[in-house]
């Protein structure tokens, strides 16, 4: 992976960018192994300013929230992802190089990271959690295959893990914990195969390019609760599951926006207007709203705030705010009618104990 803002988002979640490509960090990354004596990499990190450390902590907190909310959506909805599901490990792992160059020393000093991939989060309810994988464990091997380390460890590990995970229901992980090597058998976790990215911009928006979902820093702040953030993520995951970017021939345009916004210092001059993104037709938007709400409910989030959330968003950021969400999803009235209908259907199925399938 590029040393950029997007490293803050490869966790919890999620999935491969392309059918056989890189999976999301949280759910699959692993680290390098050595045979025999474990290598110690406890060299002191250079001192970094409080401002840099605070900035890194803020990014990590935003990433943690995004990952935490997205995880249940991805794990509880493989049936609704229209064939875009993969078996994943169920945790995130990072090195100090997972962050942009200005944060490498801070990641070592403040987060205790080094050249090896260290587990930064374990998905609740995943096979990794059940097997006893813990935050802070260092990954050494998968099925006795040593994992790479250093600046490109995440990308190299992703390339190695694809074949190692294919066709398996579980894998053997070798971890370092408190200076000792341990081995765990970890059941793989089926999940929707979409990457979740955090965008380094303050405009209130979210994008889906068919393989990835990006939520801007501004949208993350606008969503006051986990339920509200889940509405945004569910909607964009549904756009991907329904191949809406492809149907609108917007994959390249939206993909370019995501590539830009995951950088630590994106070119915000390209974010004027709608950045070339055509407004989503109301029928496609309503279909994504409906499927997204089913995903939200299956993940255990509440539906009562869905209608008020989208009403508040369209009111505070109407279509005249061209770099905002409503500008590229302008059919608010049509969408709200579909949302109200879907919420009613889902609640009726929940009351009757019926499967939550649209």
Image (spheres, grey):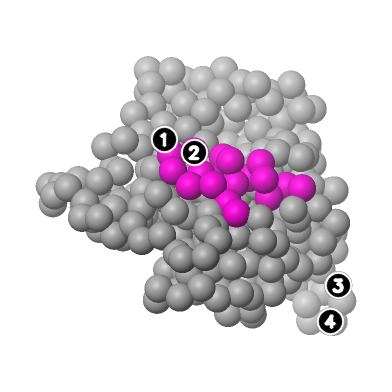
In depth, the one of 235 and 281 nearer the eye is 235
Identified at 85% across, 56% down, the residue is 167
Secondary-structure class at tag 3: loop
Identified at 35% across, 37% down, the residue is 100
Q: Position of residue 219 (x, y in %)?
A: 44, 46
Answer with the quarter of the image where residue 16 lies.
top right
Secondary-structure class at tag 4: loop
The residue that label 1 is drawn on is 4
The nearer-to-camera label among 1 and 3 is 1
Which of the marked residues, 2 or 4, is nearer the chain's N terminus? 2
The residue that label 3 is drawn on is 355
In space, the residues marked 1 and 2 are separated at their CA atoms by: 12 Å
The nearer-to-camera label among 2 and 3 is 2
Looking at the image, residue 309 sits to the left or right of residue 218; the answer is right
Determine if residue 316 is in view.
no
Identified at 73% across, 47% down, the residue is 162
Residue 5 is inside the magenta segment: no
Q: Which mark is residue 152?
A: 2
In space, the residues marked 1 and 3 are separated at their CA atoms by: 41 Å
Q: Position of residue 124 (x, y in %)?
A: 58, 74
Identified at 58% across, 79% down, the residue is 132
Secondary-structure class at tag 2: loop
In depth, the one of 286 and 47 nearer the eye is 47
The 10 Å Cα crowd at callout 3, few under 14, some 14 to 19, many 20 or more, is: few
């Amino acid at each position: 992976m590029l040393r950029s803002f997007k490293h803050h988002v490869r966790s919890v979640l999620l999935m491969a960018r392309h059918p056989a490509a890189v999976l999301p960090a949280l759910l699959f990354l692993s680290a390098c192994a050595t045979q025999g004596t474990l290598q110690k990499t406890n060299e002191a990190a250079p001192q970094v300013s409080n401002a840099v450390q605070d900035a890194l902590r803020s990014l990590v907190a935003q990433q943690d929230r995004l990952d935490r909310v997205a995880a249940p959506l991805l794990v509880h909805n493989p049936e609704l992802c229209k064939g875009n599901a993969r078996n994943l490990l169920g945790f995130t792992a990072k090195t100090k190089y997972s962050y942009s160059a200005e944060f490498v020393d801070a990641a070592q000093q403040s987060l205790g990271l080094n050249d090896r991939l260290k587990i930064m989060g374990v998905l609740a309810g995943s096979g990794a959690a059940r097997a006893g994988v813990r935050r802070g464990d260092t990954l050494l091997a998968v099925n006795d295959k040593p994992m790479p380390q250093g600046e490109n460890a995440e990308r190299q590990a992703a390339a190695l893990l694809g074949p190692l995970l294919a066709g398996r229901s579980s894998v053997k992980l070798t971890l370092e914990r408190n200076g000792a090597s341990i081995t765990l058998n970890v059941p793989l976790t089926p999940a929707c195969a979409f990457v979740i990215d955090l965008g380094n911009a303050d405009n209130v928006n979210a994008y889906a390019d068919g393989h990835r979902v990006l939520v801007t820093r501004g949208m993350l702040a606008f969503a006051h609760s986990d339920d509200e953030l889940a509405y945004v993520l569910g909607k964009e995951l549904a756009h991907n599951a329904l191949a809406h970017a492809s149907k609108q021939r917007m994959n390249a345009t939206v993909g370019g926006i995501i590539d830009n916004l995951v950088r630590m210092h994106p070119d915000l001059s390209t974010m004027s207007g709608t950045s070339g993104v055509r407004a989503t037709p109301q029928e496609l938007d309503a279909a994504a709203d409906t499927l997204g709400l089913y995903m939200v409910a299956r993940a255990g989030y509440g539906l009562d705030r869905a209608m008020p959330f989208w009403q508040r968003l369209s009111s505070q950021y109407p279509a005249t705010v061209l770099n905002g969400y409503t500008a590229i999803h302008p059919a608010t009235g049509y969408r709200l009618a579909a949302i109200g209908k879907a919420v009613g259907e889902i609640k009726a199925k929940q009351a009757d104990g019926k499967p939550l399938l649209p």
